[in-house]
Amino acid sequence: MDDIKSPETEIKSPDHGGGKRAKFKEMIEGTVEDWAIIADHAKDFNKGLAKRVLDHLRLLDGDFGGFPIDRLEHSLQTATRAHRDGRDEEYVVCALLHDIGDTLGSMNHPDVAAAILKPFVSEQNHWMVANHGLFQGYYFFHHLGLDKNMRDVHKDHEWFDYTAEFCHKYDQAAFDPAYESESLDFFTPMVERVFSKPKRSIYLEAMKE
């Protein structure tokens, strides 16, 4: 019995929006005032998105999965190589986060990263992240009895070469234990800036300050 927490001691997530809450029991009962409260909470909560994304990326620290370096270092090395090659900030953030789905999307990690980045990046960069797993397979699928040319299903796509270049120059090349990557702190301001400026979302108009 001692292990059962009372409602007073139960750990809860932070309350955003000044503690006000909507009054409805079903959405059909909602009012303009209710949804103004919810929108205010969302605006406040959204300000912490970059931090939450980076906290999740840190889960890759120490996760080697048999690779020469852990998945966080691979992410940092990929982003560092892109940055040092003169890629713009949005591209570098995509490079940093391209494998963030490894923890929760072990069978479809590109989809997870693409979903997180979609509201904040160009369609071209989103497509690159969403499809990088298939393109990365060019370098190892044949060792697993798979077709290394699976990416050719997109051979006529306008961003085929763009994505192939990302994988060749930055992703597949980023497993060097001797490479000196920039720290996660170095990239943090970039992530914060990219995630502070959503470009597309069904909620975009409602979230304007």
Image (tube, grey):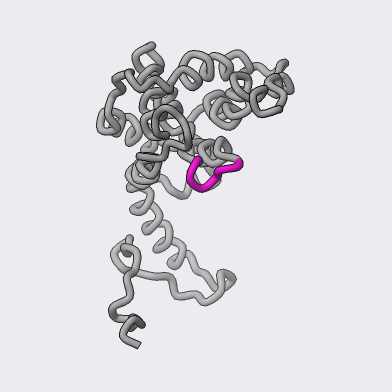
Q: Pick whichever, 42 or 32, lies toward us.
A: 42
Q: Residue at x 56, y 25 (%)?
A: 128
Q: How many tags in the picture?
A: 0
Question: Where does the image place residue 53, in percent across and percent down from the top left?
Answer: 39, 43
Residue range in magenta is: 102-107
Q: Residue at x 40, y 16 (%)?
A: 87
Asked if residue 107 is positioned above or below residue 176 in the image, the reply reads below
State whether residue 141 appears in this view: yes
Residue farthest along the bottom direction in this orientation: 1
Give the position of the N terminus as an image quadrant. Answer: bottom left
State whether residue 209 appears in this view: no
Q: Residue at x 41, y 45 (%)?
A: 208
Q: Residue at x 34, y 45 (%)?
A: 55
Q: Pick whichever, 38 or 155, lies toward us.
A: 155
Which of the 4 image quarters holds residue 58?
top left
Asked if residue 179 is positioned above or below residue 10 in the image, the reply reads above
Q: Is residue 139 left or right of residue 173?
A: right
Q: Pick whichever, 135 or 1, lies toward us.
A: 1
Q: Is residue 161 left or right of residue 34?
A: right
Question: Where does the image place residue 161, in percent across and percent down from the top left?
Answer: 60, 13
Q: Is residue 27 left or right of residue 95?
A: right
